[in-house]
Amino acid sequence: MNRLGLIKKIMLKILRKFRLKLFKIGPYSIFDFESFLYRHLEVHKTLTFIQIGANDGIMNDPIYQFNIENKDVVSGFVIEPLPDIFEKLVKNYKRCPNILPFNLAIHQSKKEATLYRVKPEYENKVSDFAKGIASFNSSHWKKTTLIPNDDYMEEIKVSCVSFFEFIKANSIKNLDLLLLDTEGYDYEILMSIDFNKIKPKIIRFEHGIRNQVMSKTQFIQLCKHLNKHGYQIIGESYDATAYLLDSDSLIF
């Protein structure tokens, strides 16, 4: 690491110690999700979450660093269906006893389903982002330019439970954050949730409209559905954050 990189690392460590953060304003959004979570923690002191599609816990993950740095007050459930990736997830969260890993997929109706993922032997030939593409949709990989052809893909059977079955089995009554990254299945999961039974304060999901991960019609329907249940929506280029505007539970 060069001198400039070392100075940057030290500065970021000091900022994080005092719960301060620098963030870059991009061309599509000025919203910083991690700062949003720190604001929640400032008000509520603890945070409980479910992450569906957790991958290895680190790669392109919006909450891993936050979880590690606040492991005494953050608890939750990280769900990853692919067995080899799940092993990495368990290893990466071994320092966080309050965060429990589950080797499952969330599906609203099936007990077992087929996922389509990049073959492990081809992982060194694709980008890190492409390694995380595992979908119930056999043609989902075509929505990116990251995977050359279907020879790179394989099918794998995974065990599934519904979202309601998962929260019931784990006696989850209250939830601060629901985070989804299921490569095309976020819409179905969110539309299946009974918000009269459980109502996360914050929901983070992937819409991916520019790559047709979610259609514009689906995104509009989902936003209207969330609005109806009291959520405000912050849209970004590829993701969106919904949060409750509740006078008894304001985070702003």
Image: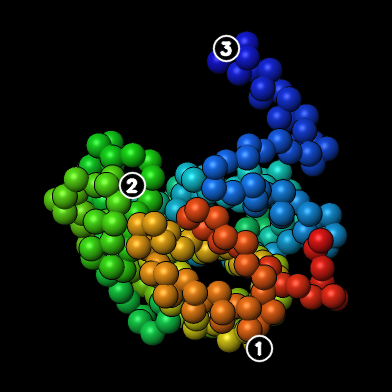
Q: Are marks 1 and 2 in contact (CB under 8 Å)?
A: no
Q: Counting residues from the N terminus, which is met first, the one under dot 1 or under dot 2?
A: 2
Q: Quadrant of the C terminus?
A: bottom right
Q: Residue at x 63, y 40 (%)?
A: 25
Q: Tell me how far mark 2 sits from mark 3, CA to CA.
A: 29 Å
**Vertical placement of residue 242 versus 149, above or below:** below
Mark 2–mark 3 contact, CB under 8 Å? no
Q: Secondary structure at mark 1?
A: loop
Residue 7 image-quadrant placement: top right
Hey, what amino acid is under mark 2? Ala
Say which amino acid is labelled 3: Asn
Question: How far apart are the two marked residues, 1 and 2, measured between alpha carbons?
Answer: 36 Å
Tell me the number on the disc at residue 196.
1
Q: Position of residue 104 (x, y in %)?
A: 43, 68
Which of the labelled discs sits on residue 130, or is there none?
A: 2
Between 168 and 140, the one nearer to me in the picture:
140
Residue found at x 76% / y 51%:
38
The residue that mark 3 highlights is: 2
Question: How dense is the environment of label 3, judged by Cα within 10 Å: few (below 14), some, or many (20 and up)?
Answer: few
Residue extending farthest to the front is 27
Q: Is residue 113 visible?
A: yes
Quadrant location of residue 228?
Answer: bottom right
Which one is earlier in the sequence, the residue at label 3 or at label 1? Answer: 3
- Could you tell which of marks 2 and 3 lies nearer the N-terminus? 3
Identify which residue is drawn at 63% across, 44% down: 65
